[in-house]
Amino acid sequence: MAVKLSVRNVFKVFGEKTDAALELLEKGNSKEDILEQTGATVGVQDASFDVGEGEIFVVMGLSGSGKSTLVRMLNGLIPPTSGSIMIDGADVASCSQDELRRIRREKITMVFQHFALFPHWSVADNAAYGLKVKGTKPAERRKRALKALEQVGLTAWADSLPAELSGGMQQRVGLARGLANGPEVLLMDEPFGALDPLIRREMQDELIELQKTLKKTIVFITHDLNEALLLGDKIAIMKDGRFVQVGTAQEIVSNPADDYVAAFVADIDRGRVFTAEDVSNDPAAMKLGTDTAEDAMRAMEDLNRNALYVVNDKNMIAGVVTYQDLAAATLNLEEPNPVLEKVMLTEYPTVDADVQLNDLYGAASGGLPIAVTDSKDRLVGVVEPEAVFAQLSGDDETVLSEASEAPPAQDSEKESANV
């Protein structure tokens, strides 16, 4: 993935004694000590990160953590005290005002929490505001504004006034206004923070769906960790102006960097963070028309599994066999080692790799391993029911450790079948 935005060693100190404040920072002094000694306020400390093209990078932090200061430096609203902010090779931190205006016109736009629509303008005119400022001709403004409104599902309200729209719809107008400019980088500063919880969740889902088509590079600011975990391809957690952890949602929930992060993720709904792909095993499977019951039983014993899928020569699933059924079938004296077609079950659970764990609970309760398939219905992974329950409970490491030490569950089944 190509890097679209690259930030290196960015500091922001507010006040007159910035050099003295930076020296104290290098010596390890706290923000409070620096404020007391110099009167300067540290906003951001040594921020470095890359955002890939088409990636959503979420910066999460409580009030006063520095996240809003950081995002305003990205488009030059606040100049950094030191460091570089590169967008396609141009340094926002040190470029001329003419170059900064060009970057804002062509590369980057911002969506704020308070959408500040003009109440006497139509929805389409509000969406076209940025284009009007840029001097775009009226006909072209209208065309691009309508396209942006279509992207956010508001075409039917193009000629309505903002007062006729709900809060969520008004926020979508604000988003359309940003999209109409055709930005390559979208900065979103707590855009859903003023919305009711239900509308906020709807907007989060809409942004996810919209991003699948638009593939914009997005820096999203929020104080809500659930929102960060839902939206972010990568997440940075800020405290006192500094990044304390950067990673994927799964990395942060599974391995919090310190007690501060651990306290945040303690009550997170893990079922919305992890997907089938995160808990799936390698797609070990038996071959249709080739392997027998004894082959499958040996494979299960080696893999410590109670069931395996059976696939054809195109790796498409034909069925699933369980150790218990195979053990019972081998007791048939007329055909003690049947081919798998005679023993396998042809009804089984399947999911896509990106399905959230919350949506796997019902399938996992059935007892069979869940097949993870790709767009061509080929087997790409297998989710054991125990892995789903363990991850949802937060005990995945403990359960996996116990499983690696325990003897295969099927051994006792084999012994009872042979009695």
Image (cartoon, rainbow, N blue to C red):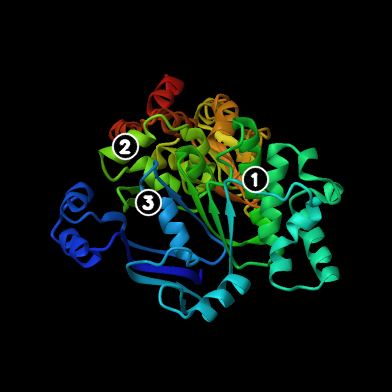
Pick the residue in front: 129 or 281: 129
Q: Name the residue located 61 percent from the left edge and 62 percent from the top edge.
A: 216
Task: State the CA–CA distance, disc 2 to disc 3.
Answer: 20 Å
Disc 1 residue type (three-letter): Ile
Residue neighbourhood size for the residue with mark 2, other residues' Cα within 10 Å, grouped as few (<14), some (14–19), many (≥20): some
Asked if disc 1 and disc 2 are in contact, CB closer than 8 Å, the reply is: no
Quadrant (top left/top right/bottom left/bottom right) for the C terminus: top left
Q: Secondary structure at mark 1?
A: strand
Q: Name the residue located 43 percent from the left edge and 69 percent from the top edge.
A: 6
- Residue at label 3? 66
Disc 2 residue type (three-letter): Ala
Res. 3 in view? yes
Res. 235 in view? no
Earlier in the chain: of badge 1 and badge 2, it is 2
Disc 3 residue type (three-letter): Gly
Indicate the quadrant where residue 261 lies: top left
Task: State the CA–CA distance, disc 1 to disc 2.
Answer: 40 Å
Q: Secondary structure at mark 3?
A: loop
Judged by depth in the image, the label closer to the viewer, 2 or 3, is 3
Q: Position of residue 173 (x, y in %)?
A: 72, 50
- Residue at label 2? 262
Q: Position of residue 304 (x, y in %)?
A: 40, 37
Pick the residue in front: 265 or 166: 166
Residue neighbourhood size for the residue with mark 3, other residues' Cα within 10 Å, grouped as few (<14), some (14–19), many (≥20): many
Judged by depth in the image, the label closer to the viewer, 1 or 2, is 2
Task: State the CA–CA distance, disc 3 to disc 1.
Answer: 51 Å
Q: Secondary structure at mark 2?
A: helix
State whether residue 97 is above or below residue 176.
Answer: below
Judged by depth in the image, the label closer to the viewer, 3 or 1, is 3
State whether residue 263 is above or below residue 46.
Answer: above
- Residue at label 1? 317
